[in-house]
Image (cartoon, grey):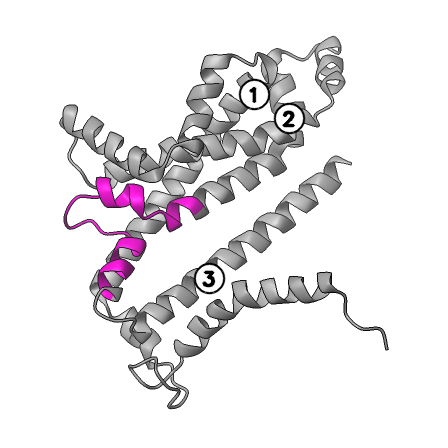
Amino acid sequence: MRRPSWTTLSGSAAYVFLYLPLLVVVAYSFNDSRLNAEWSGFTLRWYGVLAKDPAMLRAARNSLVIGLVAAGTSSVLGTLAATALHRYRPPMLTTLVLAPIAMPEVLMGVSLLLFFVSINLELGLVAVTLSHITFCVGFVAVVVRARLEGLDESLIDAARDLGASPWQAIRYVMLPLILPGVIAGSLLAFTLSMDDFVVTFFTAGPGQPTLPLQIYSMIRIAVTPEVNAISSILMVLTLAVSLTAFRVSRDIWRAGL
């Protein structure tokens, strides 16, 4: 029998290191004990407790609303920015779009906090949503621009030669071809928004928590089964959205072929 190579062993060790903690979190969300020190039996009651927790439900609703608005808005703005970067390559726009990606989150959170205070914008859901749109636009632009780099420009020129207006060429030719990139960018924006803690911490204000802030406030005392339960739900939600986006993108790509 052929012995496993070092590449196989190192890859397996990396997967165990990355995914074993996630499996432990899911497993202990079904633990009958409030303590994570030992397994004492299977139960679903922590999910019932979670469903009756008004603070957690409010935080989940806030995160979903912010994530959807940030993903939708940043998809439009990021696609427009990617198109401009692909066609004209302006240095200033490149800097403005890519700066939020390279900027440390602490610095971005502080700068946005100072900006909102200077314009007398009350910290809360609106401020958090604007903050998430700010750093999500760059990620969407990078993904869509990569899609545009593989776009056959002759298809757009052919549509124009056949009498299509600039808007018709964009709507019926370019957008269907780059739609998988737009979907991938919006998914990435939604995931980043749902996961963000640092920027949200500076701009959320009192009384408007998101899921990361609510989980942080709970684990400062102890990692309870409710935290494991909400983490498991987020994991399943993210996986389901990712698989759906992959399927939609693949179907759109095959239809385009």
Please tell me in which quadrant of the rendered image residue 136 appears: top left
Residue nearest the observer in this picture, 51 or 10? 10
Q: Residue at x 28, y 37 (%)?
A: 109
Real-space Cα distance between discs 2 and 1? 8 Å
Image position, residue 249 (x, y; %): 64, 43
* Mark sitting on residue 148: 2
Q: Which residue is mark 3?
A: 235
Q: Which residue shows up at 43% across the image and 36% down it?
A: 72
Circle 1: residue type: Thr
- The disc placed on residue 83 is 1
Q: Secondary structure at mark 3?
A: helix
Which of disc 1 and disc 2 is earlier in sequence?
1
Answer left or right for 179 relative to 104: right
Residue 73 in sight here:
no
| Up/down of 77 relative to 222, above or below | above
Q: Quadrant of the image for the C terminus?
A: top right
